[in-house]
Image (spheres, rainbow, N blue to C red):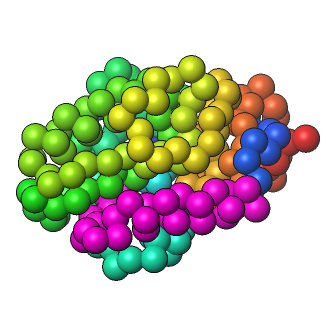
Amino acid sequence: MSAGPPKGSVGRVLVAASELEARVAELGAAITADYRDRSLLMVGVLKGAFVFMSDLAQAIDLPVEIDFMAVSSYGKSTKSSGVVRIVKDLETDIRDRHVLLVEDIVDSRLTLRYLTELLQARRPASFGVCALLVREGAPTDGIDYAGFAVGPDWVVGYGLDVGERHRSLPDVCAYDPDLPPVGQDGGRGP
């Protein structure tokens, strides 16, 4: 039996859709310049990075290939289990490829560290990381391109979720478990 939707609601906007659009364009330009003479394979981490990766791929002025991995350390909880497991592996052989891992958020670095070690062991020609969000205070070594720093709030929107909800919001918002749910999708709080 399902526990139902998570308690709480969407709170304040942390990163507006217009800011996301502008920063994704900047990241796309930087990646285009850096990979100008290389064939780029973007590896998205599902499910949270899918919206960001789609927009980013369109902002890169180069042909790119795309593949996805799905990993889990949270499940439907807002607390990490401390264990990363692969739910879906790559379909592409990355040996001798120029790989850019695309993450939604880096906070504990547990998932990023795990994926970096796993993918680098597969011997890509080069390996980079692009993260939409980086938790304030998290080490940024190993992150080549970063979108925005965010505080300790649980974040939803622009592909990120809580209990599989709120991914379709156009902004990145704080999720407040203490706000009463409003509307069919948990609503948007004040």
Res. 115 image quadrant: top left
Measuring from the top left, give residue 113's x and y in whole percent: 30, 30
- With respect to residue 109, does 29 lie above or below? below
Res. 119 image quadrant: top left
How would you classify the magenta stretch by its main secondary structure? helix
- Asked whether 25 falls inside the magenta stretch, the response is yes
- With respect to residue 178, does 41 lie above or below? below
Measuring from the top left, give residue 162's x and y in whole percent: 58, 41
Spot the residue most to the right: 190
What range of the chain is rendered magenta? 17-45
- With respect to residue 105, does 65 lie above or below? below
Measuring from the top left, give residue 95's x and y in whole percent: 8, 57
- Asked whether 91 falls inside the magenta stretch, the response is no
Residue 43 visible in image: yes
Q: Which quadrant does the C terminus fall into?
A: top right
> In the rendered view, does 99 fall on the left or right side of 61?
left
Residue at image position (45%, 77%) is 61
Residue at image position (19%, 34%) is 117
Residue at image position (50%, 75%) is 58
Residue at image position (64%, 57%) is 23
Q: Nearer the viewer, residue 80 or 119?
A: 119
